């Protein structure tokens, strides 16, 4: 069993690094606004020690994300030191929100939606030990 590295938890989420992947799991009922998003980005950069990782993001318990938060998370520091993002979802509402995020915010890194955790982690493994592809014209992916 692998150890969680650089573990962080607050009332919004928990984050840790495991097997060269950064995990982020949102707490139940969270409404992610711009202020929370910016604080979590700063924390992510801190715990990753400014190293690039693929990110596994479990949003199954999240209530929703504001437009301003989505904009912040799709550019600049929001994708800094992120090689790819896999979102774990479990509902049609979350799929619609995730699809909206990808289509309209056009993140400059590979992004994919999953309903299966193992498939998401397998997909992310190809992005371990890679630099942020946004400098190289990264792409956005969406799958249901």
Image (cartoon, grey):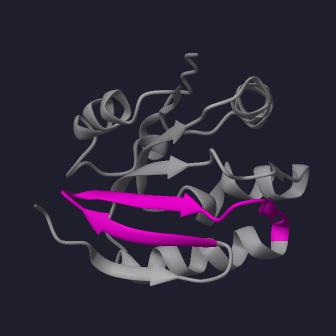
Image: magenta residue range: 13-34
Q: Is residue 31 magenta?
A: yes
In the rendered view, would you say 68 is above or below 92? Answer: below
Judged left or right of residue 1, residue 109 is right
- Which is nearer the eye, 81 or 59? 59
When asked about the image quadrant of residue 77, the answer is bottom right
Give the residue at the far left of this rendering: 1
x then y, percent, for residue 51: 31, 69
Judged left or right of residue 67, residue 16 is left
x then y, percent, for residue 76: 63, 60
Q: Residue at x 28, y 41 (%)?
A: 127
Q: Residue at x 79, y 51 (%)?
A: 71
Q: Is residue 60 magenta?
A: no
Total numbered labels: 0
Identify the image quadrant of the C terminus: top right
When asked about the image quadrant of residue 34, the answer is bottom right
Give the residue at the far top of this rendering: 144
- Which is nearer the eye, 23 or 29? 29
Q: Main secondary structure of the magenta part?
A: strand
Identify the image quadrant of the N terminus: bottom left
In the rendered view, would you say 48 is above or below 114? Answer: below
Q: Residue at x 23, y 34 (%)?
A: 126
x then y, percent, for residue 35: 82, 75
In the rendered view, would you say 28 is above or below 16? Answer: above
Q: Residue at x 57, y 39 (%)?
A: 108
x then y, percent, for residue 107: 63, 39
When asked about the image quadrant of residue 7, the answer is bottom left
């Amino acid at each position: 069993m692998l150890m969680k590295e650089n573990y962080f938890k607050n009332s919004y989420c928990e984050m840790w690094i495991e097997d060269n992947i950064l995990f982020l799991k949102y707490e139940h009922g969270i409404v992610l606004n711009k202020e929370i998003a910016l604080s979590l980005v700063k924390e992510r950069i801190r715990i990753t020690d400014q190293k690039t990782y693929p990110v596994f993001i479990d949003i199954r318990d999240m209530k929703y994300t504001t437009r301003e938060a989505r904009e912040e998370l799709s550019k600049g520091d929001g994708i800094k030191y992120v090689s790819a993002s896999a979102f774990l979802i479990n509902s049609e509402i979350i799929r619609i929100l995730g699809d909206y995020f990808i289509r309209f915010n056009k993140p400059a890194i590979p992004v994919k939606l999953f309903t299966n955790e193992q498939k998401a982690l397998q997909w992310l493994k190809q992005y371990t030990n890679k630099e942020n592809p946004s400098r190289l014209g990264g792409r956005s992916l969406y799958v249901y």
